[in-house]
Amino acid sequence: MKPFTIKLVLIMYFFASSGFLFAQDDEVNDFRIEFGKGDSAQILMIHNLTGQWRCNDGGTYYIRQVDLEIWWYGRSANGGQGFSNVFHGFIQKSGRIEGRWADVPMGRMQNSGKLVLQIGGSRILNAVSNTGGFGGGEWTR
């Protein structure tokens, strides 16, 4: 991974109800989030996760990140006949993504559950916990 520097924050949002500041640097397409205010503020760097990912379950996942919200569509290598699923979750202060997933009728599987992922940088995600029999454990790009 090549190093990056954040130069000028071009877009800033303040989510008063959540108590954090969200900033995106358009040049590097990474995110800086400040939780809290003043000396007690915590800073979390988030890589932009939007894109195509491969998982160790043999599937391809199309992830879309909108601020701290994560969406995906994932499918098995046979065009989704084995499994097809969707996920919706949120990036937490811990740097983990917590959300819910569900299989959709395109594939043979019809399960659902909760999923917690650890962000390992801009090119890796790891499952920390899951329910409902989710098969994948590591996503890379």
Image (cartoon, rainbow, N blue to C red):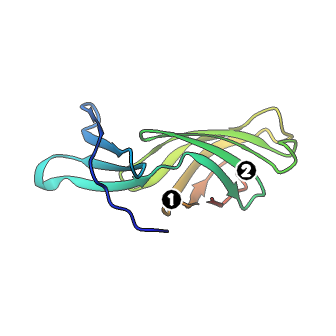
Q: Earlier in the sequence, mark 2 or mark 1?
A: 2
Residue at 86% from the left image edge and 40% from the top image edge: 108
The local crowd at label 2, few if under 14, some if 14 to 19, many if 20 or more residues have their Cα within 10 Å, is many
Dot 2 and dot 1 residues touching (CB under 8 Å):
no
At horizontal 28% and vertical 53% (from top left) the residue drawn is 7
Report the side of 120 relative to 108 (left or right).
Answer: left
Mark 1: few/some/many CA within 10 Å (<14, 14-19, 20+)? some
Which amino acid does the dot numbered 2 rest on? Thr
Residue 44: where, in percent of width, then height?
Answer: 33, 55
Question: What's the residue at 29%, 40% (across, down)?
Answer: 10
In the displayed structure, 98 sits above or below 57; it is above
Against 119, residue 51 (above or below) is above
> Which percent across, then down, holds residue 3?
40, 67
Disc 2, SS: strand
Say which quadrant the C terminus sits in.
bottom right
Q: How many marks?
A: 2
Can the viewer see residue 1? yes
Can I make out residue 132 in this image?
no
Say what secondary structure mark 1 lies in.
loop
Badge 2 is on which residue?
A: 60
Closer to the camera, 25 or 73? 25
Name the mark on residue 122: 1
Q: CA distance from mark 2 to mark 1?
A: 17 Å
Q: Which mark is residue 136?
A: none
Q: Is residue 126 left or right of residue 58?
A: left
Q: Tell me which amino acid carries mark 1.
A: Ser
In the rendered view, would you say 37 is above or below 117? Answer: above
Q: Identify the image quadrant of residue 138.
A: bottom right
